[in-house]
Image: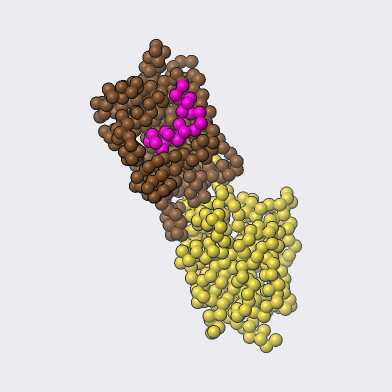
Chain colours: A brown, B yellow
Amino acid sequence: MSQNTRRVLALAGGVGGAKLALGLSAVLPAEALTVAVNTADDFEHLGLSISPDLDTVMYTLSGLANPETGWGRRDESWNTMAALEQLGGETWFRLGDKDLATHIERTRRLRAGETLSAVTRDLAQRLGIKCTVVPMTDSAVRTVVTADQGDLAFQDWFVRLRCEPAVRRVRFAGADKARANPALLDMAGLRGVIFCPSNPFVSVAPILAIPGVRMTLQQTRVPRVAVTPIVGGQAIKGPAAKMLAELGHDVSALGVARYYKGLIDGFVLDQADASLKAEIEGLGIKVHVADTMMHTDDDKRRLAAATLEFVDALARSLQHS
Amino acid sequence: MSQNTRRVLALAGGVGGAKLALGLSAVLPAEALTVAVNTADDFEHLGLSISPDLDTVMYTLSGLANPETGWGRRDESWNTMAALEQLGGETWFRLGDKDLATHIERTRRLRAGETLSAVTRDLAQRLGIKCTVVPMTDSAVRTVVTADQGDLAFQDWFVRLRCEPAVRRVRFAGADKARANPALLDMAGLRGVIFCPSNPFVSVAPILAIPGVRMTLQQTRVPRVAVTPIVGGQAIKGPAAKMLAELGHDVSALGVARYYKGLIDGFVLDQADASLKAEIEGLGIKVHVADTMMHTDDDKRRLAAATLEFVDALARSLQHS
């Protein structure tokens, strides 16, 4: 099998992960990309089973994503929400009219006994996605954020409270009993594993918390590369920087690299943070410096291609080590 | 209490019933009108608890009804349905984006343990409805249509199969164990009971099938008036005429009057059917001839006022009998 058709496994959360996944899907053959997506911020809301990260990845890969928000669908309308508000319903979690169809169809099929991975496969196919998108697990895993006022369900903290309460601890209820998607446990023949630029604590950590995943990633000889979600000490999107601080880490790409130590061979550092290169390499992690900001589709393709080149270079050096 | 503030109880199904209810709400003080609505064509669809007749009545009374279809909301959009179709979901039962909010909110509250009457009261209030709207029962009653090919759930027959299969029998699963809304059992002080021009077999019959309702209506001294749903041998809307024929009744207002014999004191006959007056009076039912077609809001008010006058005239003659 040629290098180009060997499979890449990408671990992704929402917006940032989806962007790199889109870049990877543009430079890889469809059969060579599996995106394993965090489902620990899934929740039941308005009676619907909502999988925010899966949807963001699917909408992004199918070109349906809203480019302004990163989440939800483009050309969206909000008539159901407006009517729900009139009826006194809960509207703090904004669900667009088109987006609602995804939740309605997913919920119906899950209730009928289908697995989340089966439903995801079909939805992705209906949306015209050619690569493979899998939930990290079919089991229910739920992120719980411990703040000063007590435990908060993830979306309560993330959306309703706008990430405001300081985070003392994050745990993943149900993770210990969850079964990982097989794609996360089978490293045979993989070209590489890519940690997308997603929040380490609430997007990647839940994937790692599923029994077998961390150990598989620790033990594999397949090159593992993380793309930084932190540039210039700030999260590109979301609360990653705030959480680094609150959880006692260095608020920088270095803090992220330290968090992933033992799990990654390489780290894609933004050019703005090139000064951190030596310190990260001091952790035994190879560093590739690139422009990691993904504003355009071209940016995404370029970063994906650079990351894959880095993966392949690491593979060569791992073979020689 | 003056005649005008004594309470009227209207029994209603969907479109036809809602129209007369709107007329009644325009000519009666809010506290003097209770509309008891059929819930036997309620169903679970796409994971949502849908109450078509309650919604038609609520949307009509609040001025939100779609004047073209009679069901659903005006100025509606269909973006969720279009997206659902793309995802391979079920779209034979059309749910508009605004309408969906009603089903989502109702479903959420029912699942949380609230009764349908409590949810209906709040939704009606949110929609600005001043009179009282109650479901015929809080229990699950479901119309089952027996056709040649076997039993069909009501909406399967009504919407999906467009009423095409010939009806051999209609039954109301769960009716025998249902508890009637108290408004259907308490005739004390009522000015009158009005059977709205709804389908006798699938809108009014389910209400009568709830334990106690038929007997209460049979035994009361309160004047009871039915407004014909059949004009010139045709249903104003829906399959009432087809069902009269298939169930072996005369396909006319006379067939309806015979079906209601023992339950009504008066029958509002359309002027087009004036020739049936003597035959209906032969059943021991008083007849008032009127223009029963309700095209405009003015028509609705006029028919409502005429029906109330007829109710009051019957009350006087019942007192003297």
Q: Which residue is drawn at 47% across and 47% down?
A: A100
Which quadrant: the C terminus of chain B? bottom right
Residue B255 picture quarter: bottom right
Q: Is residue A163 visible?
A: yes
**B306 within the magenta span:** no
In the figure, B289 relative to A258: above or below?
A: below
User: Who is closer to the viewer here, B18 or A86?
Assistant: A86
Instruction: Return the residue nearer the eye: A120 or A192.
Output: A192
Q: What residue range appears in magenta? A: A199-219
> Is A232 on the left-hand or right-hand side of A317?
left
The image position of residue B170, as x and y in percent, is 71, 59
Q: Where is residue A13 in the image (x, y as percent from the top left)?
A: 42, 35
Image quadrant in which the N terminus of chain B is located: bottom right
In the foreground, A180 or B97? A180
Task: Find residue B53 and report its horizontal and vertical position in percent.
Answer: 58, 61
State yes or no: residue A210 in magenta: yes
Height in image: B280 above or below A314? Answer: below
